[in-house]
Amino acid sequence: MVIKTRESENVVIFDIEGEIRRSDTAQTTLHSLVKAQLDRGRRNVLLDLGGVEFIDSFGVGEILASYISTQNLGGKFKLCRISKKLLLIFQITMLHKVLEIHEDCDRALESFEKA
Amino acid sequence: MADGRLERFLNRFGDVRGREARAALTLSGFFFLITFTFYIIKPVKESFLIGFARPSWWPFADLATALLIGFVVALNARLLNRLPRRTYLTACLLFFIASLFVFWFVFDVHRTMQIMTPVADSSGISFFLWLQVAIPKFWPFPVFVFCFWADVFIVMSVTQFWIAVNDVFGPHQAKRLVGLFVTGGLFGGIAGSALAALMVFARLIRPEDLLLVCPALLVLALVTINIVYAEQRRIDAAAGDGPVSAAARVGYLESFRAVKRSRYLLLLAAMLASAMIAGSLINYQFKTVVKSAIENSGDRTSFIAVFFLAILAVSTVFHLVTTGRILKSYGIRWAILIAPVFLIAGSLAVFLIPAGAMLAWVCAARGGDKTFDNTISQSVRELLYVPVPAEVKYKAKIFIDMFVNKFATGLGAGLFLLLYSLRRFEYRADQPLAIVREIGVLTLIFLFLWLVLTRLVYREYPAVLKKDIRPKWTEGRQAVAAHVDVDLTLKIFNTIQSRERSTTLYYMNVFNLLRGNDLAPELKELLGIKRDELKARAMDSLFDVAGGVFFPGLEEAIADTEFQSEIDLVFLLPSYQEIMGRRLGEIIGSASEVDRIEAANSISRMVPDPPTLQALGRLLQDPSAEVVVYALNSASVHRRPEHVPLIVRQLANPMTSAEAQSALAAYGPGIEDLIGPILRASDEPLEVRRAIPEVLARVGTQLAADILVEELARRRDDVEQALVDALYKIRADRREVRFREKAVRPELLFLIKKGCDISLNPPGPAGEAKAALNIRIKRIFDLMTLMHSPEDIVNAYQNILQGTARSVDYSLEHLDNLLDRELKSLLFPLIEDLPPEERALRLKKAMRLK
């Protein structure tokens, strides 16, 4: 898994490539990266999952932990470009009720501005 | 004047902040003009009443006002509800201006007994001729009308002023600014009294001609209040707060019902009524003594005039020196007590003092009552209205301030008359001490009632305040818990993942999903593949995106109780346990990660004999995180103490940390003694120490909470965040757990001081320092939940961070009432919207730095 961080306006975007799974995780986890951004005062986080083929339970735990950390500080945590397969699983598990998911990353960025 | 200079100037009279300076000054100017006008009208009213009505009629003037004021309240409530605020205030002021001309005309006609300047219109001449006959005929009825009008003017004007304050400022702002407003009022009173006294004393004009000065002042007031509302509309639009508008259309009865429906408003009305009755009785004590001590009418009038001027002067000094400081340092909580406590002490003294000191005592008592009423009591009274919801506030305020206020004064007069007739005071006029003491007993009853009611009102105050502090967002954990079963979700993702790894593991996880029990991989072979395949095919649809249904046949499988029973029976077979026990050793040594995962998973269903537990111990140290995760799950089932150190070691690994925390938490109460020492051991890896508080939070016992607080007291920066997070979680989830203020408060103070340090000595560039401070402030609020209601603190934090100007102010006011003086003095400069220099100044002062 490769995670690249960039910023657009006041939104921190994590572009993730590969699979978010336990076995592919180095010492730096997604949650620790998100927390570092929150510690820097950033409050709007967007995960671009366009390059993600698979997420295991560890990955879901990381996403939920990132969401909780962001939400507790009054921030916004959103996902974009999630695959149809993953979206279906997110729907079954009701994760889509908690995590704001956008098909398109530009729309997601616009939604931060509106909020 | 530039805003900065204006702010510095106004700060002499109250705690005025940048953007609010103009509105505060304008409103203070409005109050100045209103009281200026009233203190010109007041001597005219008193002079006419004394001159044209017999003394025995005086209490009836108060009673008449008490009875008639209800009609004015009804009319006023109707106007307030029907008209936009600005129109309503303008209309009222225009009415008072017009009335002043009418009264001047009536008094002038009475004095001169001449027809007014002839007018061309014949009907006009007839009207003035009729007046010339009617005014002397009905005299002194117009004087009573004027007295009533003057009462209505002052009560309405003051009420309208405080309505404007409520419209423009929030409770915390109002508390800071009330000193400035009251100063405006007191200066207006002094200016009005001085002007009236000088003009009449110097015989420059007749008393009734003073009424012609008042319209000019009221026109200025009209301009002033319109400026305030025009500016406020602009600020509200910019801040996103709703505009001030007329409330729902309800009448007088609805105003009464609004008060009746709210326990807080009922208590407030009762408190103000008690204060007014006590004040009225003190007034009669004063009159009785003054009448007895100063027999000459001229001397008496002169004495009373000087006395009231002195009260205004003393009130001004007292106000400038104390009101703002008391409110700022001690808040409403203690400020509300000052008047009744001092007056009780003063009233008790009447039973001890000799007759010779009676005049001095009564002046002190009446002076004290009026001084408090002009200053701290007035300020507190108005602040108590501020948090009342807008739709109720104005109805209630008019009803209480106008009707209850005057009715209570009338009731005081009625009680005096009753006592007068029962005790036949007229036969003991030579014993003022006895009369005053008998009134004193009655006064003390109402003063004590006032005192009790202040406590009851204050107890309700935070609840009223909180209604306007609504959550801005749902806390993360709550938001997730509301929609997602996290354990089930993780199991589903595990199952999907396991399919690519091993069919066995996949089936195992499928059955885990189906019934919450574990299923050993070896059992699959015994049961036969067909049935499993059926289940597996159901899971295949997970990967068939085009398929519409997940888990077809799921309900059928769950209902298959015979099948589930068969599985349970096999697990209990001694032969199964024996075979599995023998195979475990081989599997653990296997190079296959999948085999080890399956073994780690199977152990959860096995009898915990020594070989099995030993195998589990080895799997907990497996180099593969996947294996360890399954082993941790099995360890959480068997919960053996010998595995705790191995599980603890996994806390250091970010890939297994969450599962290790869950496994340790599954041990439940009792684990605290095993992991508590690890938390304290500084030689343990930092990641381990940081992960343990979460485990203790999930265990959630009193002992776990005590360990966390104890560790927090060691003040180690590296685990501070984890400790506060864990304590916050326990507080939110386990209401039965108690936190001792004695233990928590020093840590809270320490955290706030660290926040102050960051603010005064920023660790890096401005952006980083601000972010660090924000994180620190969040931590402070989280810790604060241990001492106060978590909902209140969370809501206050959220509103301070993202609320509108009004909700921020309500939140600050709420905290102001919750926290003690030291905590407030340090925390408020961190969270209030202040210019950097001002913030630094306040922080240094609070931390006693030079």
Image (spheres, helix red, strand yellow):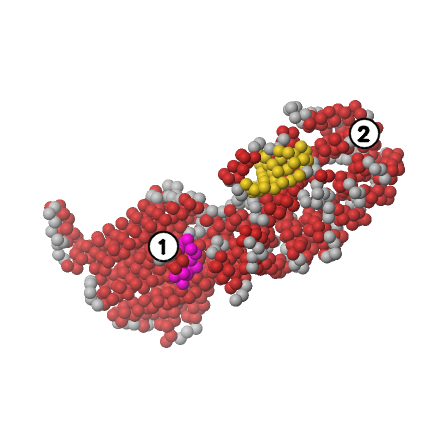
Residue B797 in picture, x, y percent from top left: 54, 50
Give the amino acid at mark 1.
Leu
Q: Is residue B485 left or right of residue B520?
A: left
Residue B265 in picture, x, y percent from top left: 44, 51
Q: Label 1 is found on which chain of the structure?
A: B
Q: Is residue B536 left or right of residue B451?
A: right
Residue B59 in picture, x, y percent from top left: 31, 60
Q: Quadrant of residue A79?
A: top right
Which disc, if any, is residue B524? 2
Q: Label 2 is found on which chain of the structure?
A: B
Query: Residue at image x 32%, y 45%?
Result: B87
Identify the residue position indicated by label 1 in the image.
B27
Query: Residue at image x 65%, y 45%?
Result: A32
Q: Quadrant of residue B380?
A: bottom left
Distance from the alpha carbon under mark 2 to that under mark 1 = 83 Å
Magenta highlight on residue A74: no
Query: Residue at image x 66%, y 57%?
Result: B716
Magenta highlight on residue B18: yes
Disc 1, SS: helix
Q: Which residues are magenta?
A: B8-23
